[in-house]
Image (cartoon, coloured by chain):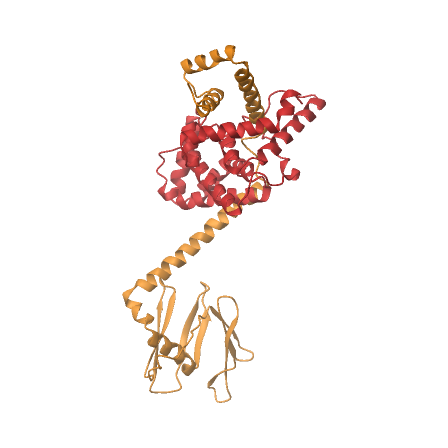
Chain colours: A orange, B red
Amino acid sequence: MKTPSEENHDLIRWLDDEMTVGERRAFEANWQSDPELAAEAESMRWLSERIKAHLPAEIPVPHADFFNSQIQARIAQMEVDDARERAETAASTSSRFLWLRLPWLAGAAAAALAIVGLVWTQSGSSGCSTILSTYTPNPSMKAQVIEHVDAVATVLLLEGLDPIPAEKKVVGFHVHHAESDAEVATTTLFDENGAVLAVVALNAQGQPQMLK
Amino acid sequence: MSAAPAATDPVEQQLDVDLVIRSQAGDTRAFDLLVTRYRSRIYAMTYHLVRNDTEAWDLAQEAFIKAWRALPNFKQDAAFYTWLYRIAHNVTCDWLRKKKIQGDGEFDDEHTNHRAMPGSRTMPQGFDTPDRAIKRQELGQRIDQAIARLSVDHRQAVMLREIEGLSYEEMAEVMGCSLGTVMSRLFYARKKLQEMLKDTYENPI
C-alpha cells in the first residue's frame, strides 16, 4: 500500500506527464473506484492549464534599450576596474618596487615632498600628469623621478635626507592632474576626486613657494 | 517531458554557440545580442519570483552581468539559456533570501499589469469577446494574487514547472534539492493554489 506522500507524488507525476504509459494506465484505472481522486486530478489539471495560460514565459523588459546599454556600461566599467586591479597587483608584487613598501622609506619620501617644495606637473594628451622638473632647496639633496607606466605609478626618489623616525606617521597623496595659470603664475595640483592638494607659485625671487 | 528553457531550433542553438564564442573572446557586441535574445525570458522569471518591476529589472541585469563574468568558464556543455537561467535563478533566490520575502506578504495590484508577448508560447489562442476578455483578466489577477501568496520555495516550484517547463531532474538541479522534495513542493504548492482558487474552479469566471 502506498503512503500518502507516494500517492501525492503519483498525482503530481500524472499531472506533469512524468509517468510511463503503464503507470499512467494504472493510475487512471483507480479513478473508477476512487471518484475523489478523479475529482482531485481533474481540479489540479484545470488549475495547471489556467496557470500556464495566464503566466507569460516572456515579459517585455521595460526600457529595453536602456537595459542593454546599462549592461554594456557596467561591463566597460568592470574592464577598467579589472585593469586597474591588475596594475596594482603587478605593482605590489613587482620585486623592483618592493622596497617602496618599507614604512620608513615611504615616510621619508612623503616627508621629502614637503622639503622639495615644488613638483612641476603637466597634463599630457593621455590625461595623465607628467613631472617635468623638480627643485630641491638643499643642494646636497638629489631628486629623481621614476615613472612606471604598467604599474600606473610615479616614484620620487630623494637622496641626502636624514632618516625619518619610524614612529612618525606620514600620509602621502596622489596627484591626479595639475592646472597652471600663467596669468598669476601658479600651478594647482588636484587629486583623483578633483580636490585641490596644493597650490604652488613663484615668489619675487623666482623661488617656488607653497600657497596651500 | 522536458521543455527545456533553451533555444530548441538547431539554427537558433548554433547562433547561441557562435555568440557565446564571440563573447568569450571579449566581443561585447555579441553579448549584447545574447542579452537581447533572452532578456524577456529572464525578466519574466525574475518578475514572477519577486513580483516587483524594479527589483526584477535590477535582478535580470545582475544575472547578465554575472553571466558575462562567468562566461570564460562556460564550457557549452549545456545550452546557453539553461546556464543563464540557473545564474538568474540563483541571483534571484539569493536576493529573496536576503530580503526574507515570505509568501504571506502583502500583494500589490500595481505589479500585475504585465501581458504576455505576442507569439509567446503561453499566449492564449483565439480572440475573446470583451466580456470574456474581462473575465479572463480577472482570473489572471486571481492567479497572480494566489501565486504571490505562496512561499518562495513553492512559488519557484510552480514557476519552474508550469512556466519554464523544466523536468523534475532539472528542477532538482536548479533548486538544489531531491526529486522527492521537488514533487512534494509541487504538490503542496498546487494544493494551496487549489484552495485559494477553489471558487473560480467551482464557478468558472
Q: Residue furthest left?
A: A95
Point 45% across, 30% down: residue: B182
Locate residue B69 relative to residue A60 in the image: left or right: left
Towards the viewer: A208 or B163: B163
Q: Is residue B179 visible?
A: yes
Where's residue B160, x and y in %? 49, 31
Point 60% across, 32% down: residue: B146
Q: Quarter holding the C terminus of chain B?
A: top right
Where's residue A211, x and y in %? 52, 82
Point 43% across, 56% down: residue: A81
Report which quarter residue B180 is drawn in. top left
Q: Is residue B80 visible?
A: no
Towards the viewer: A35 or B196: A35
Q: Which residue lies furthest to the bottom in this view?
A: A205
Locate residue A134 relative to residue A193 in the image: left or right: left
Q: Quarter holding the N terminus of chain B?
A: top left
Towards the viewer: A18 or A28: A28
Point 66% across, 39% down: residue: B110
Where's residue A181, x and y in %? 54, 76
Report which quarter residue A119 is drawn in. bottom left
Task: Judge whether B104 appears above or below A21 on screen.
Answer: below
Where's residue B172, x and y in %? 42, 32
Numbered disc total: 0
